[in-house]
Image (tube, grey):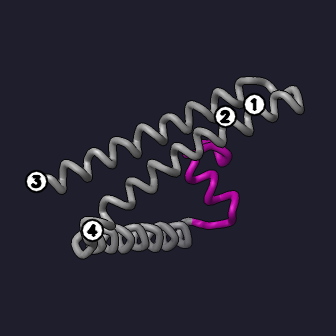
Amino acid sequence: MAAGEGTAAAKFFRSIGLVSGRRSILMLVVSWTLNLFWLGLNYFWRIASVEVLLAIPALLLLYALLALIGYIYWGVREVQEQDAPYANVMVGVIVAITLLYFNFSLLQFVLQAIAQ
């Protein structure tokens, strides 16, 4: 393999100046941080009240709805004022609808988990 080839992660680490030893240490720190975050998240779900468990997905659903409205409003406004392509509006709407769908699915999952 030539010196310029490699995975995207290896290229990224080389570009920021991390050699193999430092890269290993960084990956250990990242994995430790993610594990710590995961343990904290699991602990939070055990001590949180039902109202909090319902409020988080409900607020995320509200955020997704506001994001959809914002993408449509600002996208159409940009098209009208700056003659931007409609593709930007469509991409924003698709992202917002996907976010809305995922948040709705999360709310359904939480409701089913609480009902059991």
The circle on residue 72 is 2
Residue situated in front as seen by the camera: 32 or 87: 87
Q: Tell me which segment is drawn in magenta.
A: 1-19
Nearer the viewer's eye, disc 3 or disc 4? Answer: 3
Q: CA distance from mark 1 to mark 4?
A: 40 Å
| Residue on which disc 1 sits | 76
Q: CA distance from mark 3 to mark 4?
A: 15 Å
- Residue kind at label 3, given as amino acid type: Gln
Q: Residues within 10 Å of mark 3 (few under 14, many from 20)?
A: few
The answer to which of marks 1 and 4 sits earlier in the sequence is 4
Q: Position of residue 9 (x, y in %)?
A: 56, 52
Q: Quadrant of residue 68?
A: top right
| Residue on which disc 3 sits | 116
Q: CA distance from mark 2 to mark 3?
A: 38 Å
Question: Tags 1 and 4 in contact by the CB under 8 Å rule?
Answer: no
Q: Position of residue 85 (x, y in %)?
A: 79, 24
- Residue kind at label 4, given as amino acid type: Trp
- Residue 88 is left or right of residue 95, and the answer is right
Circle 4: element type: helix
Q: Quadrant of the N terminus?
A: top right
Single out the residue that lies furthest toward the top: 86
